[in-house]
Image: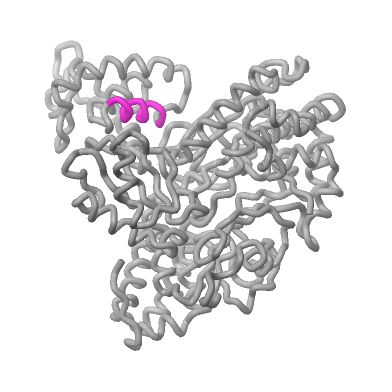
Amino acid sequence: MELVVTRNFGNPKPWTLASYRESGGYEALERVLKEMSPEDVTELIKASNLTGRGGAFFPTGLKWEFVRKDPKTPRYVVVNADESEPGTYVNRLSLELDPHMTIEGMIIAAYASNAERGYFYIRGEYGLSHERVKAALREAYDAGFLGQGICGRDDFNLEVEFRRGAGAYIVGEETALFNSLEGKRGNPRFKPPFPTNFGVWGLPTAINNVETLAAAPAIVMKGAEWFKDLGIGDAAGTKMYCLSGNVVNPVCVELPLGVSAREVIMDHGGGVPEGRTLKGFKPGGASSAPLTPAELDAPLEPKSMAELGTIMGTGGVVVFDDTACMVDVAYRDALFFEDESCGFCIPCREGTPNLVQICERILHGQGTMDDLDLLEELGASMMASFCGLGHFAHQPVRGAVSRFREEFEAYIHGGHRRAET
Amino acid sequence: MLNSPANFQVNGRAAARPYCMAIHHTELETPPGREPLPEAERPKLDTLRERLQPLKELPGSSIEALYAAQELFSYVPPEAITMIAEELKIPESQVFGVATFYTMFSLEPQPPNVLRVCRDLSCHLAGAPKLIGALEQELGVPRGHASPDGQFIVKVVSCLGLCDMQPAMLVNLDQHGPVMPDDVPNLLDDIRNGAG
């Protein structure tokens, strides 16, 4: 199968400009600037059905068009590389191995959305990515792909600033990221107004995930139809899936969007370690509710995952074998969200520690059957949270209860005792 | 103590200080409950002020400013928060808010080697609890405390995005993984010898 965003990973020193140029890098940008208008680019991206790879799967071309149509200036383009979803490391690999592809995508996005300023925001823990992206931005400036009069076009300028975070999951939420860029606490903002009209500094902003932007140059070179056909069924393009947990090979593979979980886990991950059996898996990071082996053949794409009551998320597939305790798994997720809740709104600030307490109670053999109902009720009230974190924080716990109920009941009825780790 | 509204003065006359008004210290003061910067460290404040100058041109650079302080002092001392607020012309409360919001900033002095161990799902399944236990045992202190030689601190943190190296950890910003409990003594030795 043809690779899109990971195709250069095996090249020698793929993070350098020289290597990227050798494999056809920045040719898409040159073609865009020579042959296409911003309208042509958004039409092309819309036709390719490229959607946001950060987990929301919003149509990318549409986003860029909204930004371009907003009369306020200057417009911004922002790379969201605050990848912090547990079980997800796809953006890290792209930034470390092929930062120029994302930068080229960013410049194309800026042209299509008529933006003249940009931020490249990377989470604080990705030290190697900081170095590689900073060096790549310098190289791009020196080669005339960034700055004033890009590729000899006097009417197209883009000034990009590198920024790093300092440890906050919630900053991956786009409006929280804007606050972080403005030097504030990373609390999310109310939507609407949406980022396309009211983004960083209150100006129209095209904010995209690394993987989304990295796909843009290939679409320009090979066409919308080509990209669309890469996906399976209605899903368009490819997705980087990454494996972790109880799996033989914790690797990242680029596969058609809509591939089955079986293919990802069994063929590419090598399944669970020898002598163990598969108990379940999470399709997309901590926020996604776990699924059972019976659902292995479900296509990993947003629509079918939603039908199963979980989410496609980031493509971070976490595998559980028979040694994993699903109550403990739910507890870990609850701990994560308790830690990462920004504390701004009550349903999330109070709800996440309550999830932890209920899980703890059950783990310590002090839970009751009422606790399982309480989790449902708590989840319903957490839907009143201000942002997505609160909306998703209870899903992994409730999902674990609905699919692995017998494990929770075993604890409640005293069948299990587990030492605190 | 901070200037209280009672002794706030305008043109030499006592006046009520507006609640939101930034305090401009002639001498940097320490808020209650926090240790002032040791005398020996104070000359570094001039270096910090120099390093803050280019950030004045970059709106919204308070995170970078806090990184600059932490790089100099190993933590963000109260005097640095006041100085950042004054230099970048933002409320002190906002700088303090940012310093406490992001987990990578410390308000307490830190050892030179901060070991961040991932405690989330993938690393947990791959044996992070045993790794954390081995680190605590080898260093002789629980997580969150500086080791007796003052060289290390173990912090148990959210997912580091190193799940392909599960169980993974960061030594400052250097990636390590998979780290098995048996690897811990050698890893610590390497860091002590500067090869970490």
Q: Where residue B123 sits in the image (x, y, percent)?
A: 43, 58
Quadrant where the C terminus of chain A is found in the figure: bottom left
Which contiguous range is marked in magenta?
B63-72
Residue A387 shows up from this direction: no
Q: Could you say which is closer to the camera, residue A288 or residue A342? A: A288
Q: Could you say which is closer to the camera, residue A117 or residue B180? A: B180
Residue B160 shows up from this direction: yes
Q: Quadrant of residue B37?
A: top left
Residue sitting at 68 percent across and 28 percent down? A115
Q: Where residue A16 sits in the image (x, y, percent)?
A: 64, 29
Vertical position of residue A239 compared to residue B49: above or below: below
What scheme was used to colour the molecule? one colour
Quadrant where the N terminus of chain A is found in the figure: bottom right
Name the side, left or right, on which A420 lies relative to B59.
left
Q: Quadrant of residue B8?
A: top left
Q: How many marks overall?
A: 0
